[in-house]
Image (cartoon, rainbow, N blue to C red):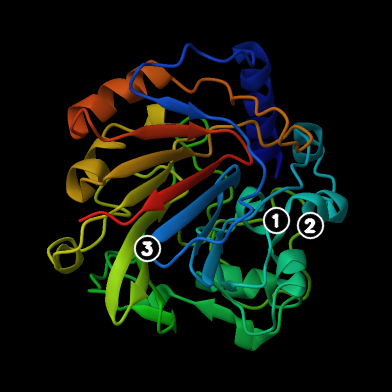
């Protein structure tokens, strides 16, 4: 506990010393500003993407929507360091949460507080058929707050190598006939001094949800391939990796990359990407997506608002742009969205 508090204090000092000014935006990256929520529903050949902040996204095509890592509460860093119980900001969630009528699932990539702490409250507002998909640690961490039948652990269905080194081919998980996902074992960039904070796995159901920042253990990190389908054919394929990881961690298996369906959109969290050698080169070279959206770039410890999105310190956007240029053709758009920014994609050949 003492070591972790020391590391958290070091992180706080690093944030303060780094400042919070926005780096110049490289020409390779296009900024997207917040907009009003779409007034019209997307057709089956359209995909709506809304950036919610941190790793959070809302995806919808036709009558099917999915939430990934929805997080609005943004506890201040002082709560992290002093190990205060983290407060779910129901008022902020109620103000900014997208419509849930078409929601089919909530995805959680790992179980740090900035990915998972708001999920129980959001799940309580969603239709009762909506499952919460993630790792065994997610299921065990939220067991006291969400009905067990709604907590779907994906470790046995994920592709790649989990922490124990076994190789798994992976399998599709169908949310309904129009929406499926493939979980992929992924990783997490180091926070400080080469260490990932709170990286344990929770192997038994907890009597209450985690309270302090140190209680939220990441468990096995996952990335996801999400297919929006029509007549058993994927119309849109989205790759979702909300935390940066070193390839091959998080990269989909060869059988999927070779199935003839291109990745229409790659959603990539970039927090601490500078502490990795091969991110995002490895994943982008494998995927060759048609569009890229950058996630987890904002300050997730300030009061949540969509009127202004401040950058986290040390983004190193110029270095990121160099890697993007190396991995992608020049005509592939790369977006840096503000909270509440909306993108509507059309089906393309």
Q: Earlier in the sequence, mark 1 or mark 3?
A: 3
Is residue 99 rendered to the left or right of residue 332? right
Q: Residue furthest right?
A: 91
Decide: marks 2, 1 in contact (CB < 8 A)?
Answer: yes
Q: Nearer the viewer, residue 21 or 217?
A: 21
In the drawing, what numbered circle is on residue 304?
Answer: none
Q: Is residue 314 visible?
A: yes
**Residue carrying label 1:** 215
Tag count in the figure? 3
Q: Residue furthest bottom?
A: 149
Is residue 299 rendered to the left or right of residue 156? right
Residue 164 rendering spot, x and y as whole percentages: 33, 66
> At 72% from the left edge and 55% from the top edge, which residue is drawn?
97
**Residue carrying label 2:** 211
**Residue carrying label 3:** 45
Under circle 1, the secondary element is loop
Seen in the picture, residue 269 relative to 94 is either above or below; the reply is: above
Under circle 3, the secondary element is loop
Q: Quadrant of the N terminus?
A: top right
């Amino acid at each position: 506990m003492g070591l972790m508090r020391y590391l958290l204090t070091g992180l706080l000092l690093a944030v303060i010393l780094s400042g919070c000014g926005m780096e110049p935006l490289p020409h390779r990256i296009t900024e997207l500003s917040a907009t009003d929520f779409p007034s019209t529903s997307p057709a089956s050949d359209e995909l709506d993407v809304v950036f919610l902040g941190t790793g959070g996204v809302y995806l919808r095509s036709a009558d099917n929507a999915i939430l990934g890592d929805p997080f609005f509460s943004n506890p201040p860093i002082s709560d992290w360091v002093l190990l205060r119980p983290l407060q779910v900001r129901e008022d902020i969630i109620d103000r900014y949460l997208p419509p849930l009528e078409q929601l089919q699932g909530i995805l959680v990539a790992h179980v740090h507080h900035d990915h998972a702490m708001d999920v129980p409250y959001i799940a309580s507002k969603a239709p009762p058929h909506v499952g919460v998909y993630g790792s065994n640690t997610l299921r065990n961490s939220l067991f006291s707050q969400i009905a067990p039948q709604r907590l779907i652990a994906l470790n046995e269905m994920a592709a790649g190598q989990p922490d124990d080194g076994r190789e798994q081919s992976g399998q599709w998980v169908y949310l309904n006939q129009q929406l499926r996902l493939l979980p992929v074992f992924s990783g997490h960039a180091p926070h400080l001094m080469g260490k990932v904070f709170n990286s344990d796995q929770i192997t038994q159901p907890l009597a209450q949800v985690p309270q302090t920042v140190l209680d939220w253990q990441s468990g096995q990190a996952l990335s996801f391939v999400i297919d929006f389908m029509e007549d058993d054919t994927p119309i849109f394929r989205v790759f979702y990796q909300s935390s940066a990881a070193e390839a091959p961690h998080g990269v989909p298996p060869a059988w999927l990359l070779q199935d003839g369906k291109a990745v229409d959109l790659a959603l990539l969290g970039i927090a601490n990407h500078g502490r990795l050698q091969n991110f995002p080169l490895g994943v982008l070279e494998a995927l060759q997506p048609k569009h890229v959206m950058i996630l987890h770039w904002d300050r997730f410890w300030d009061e949540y608002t969509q009127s202004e999105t401040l950058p986290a310190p040390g983004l190193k956007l110029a270095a990121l742009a160099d890697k993007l240029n190396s991995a992608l053709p020049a005509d592939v758009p790369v977006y840096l969205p503000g909270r509440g920014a909306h993108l509507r994609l059309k089906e393309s050949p």
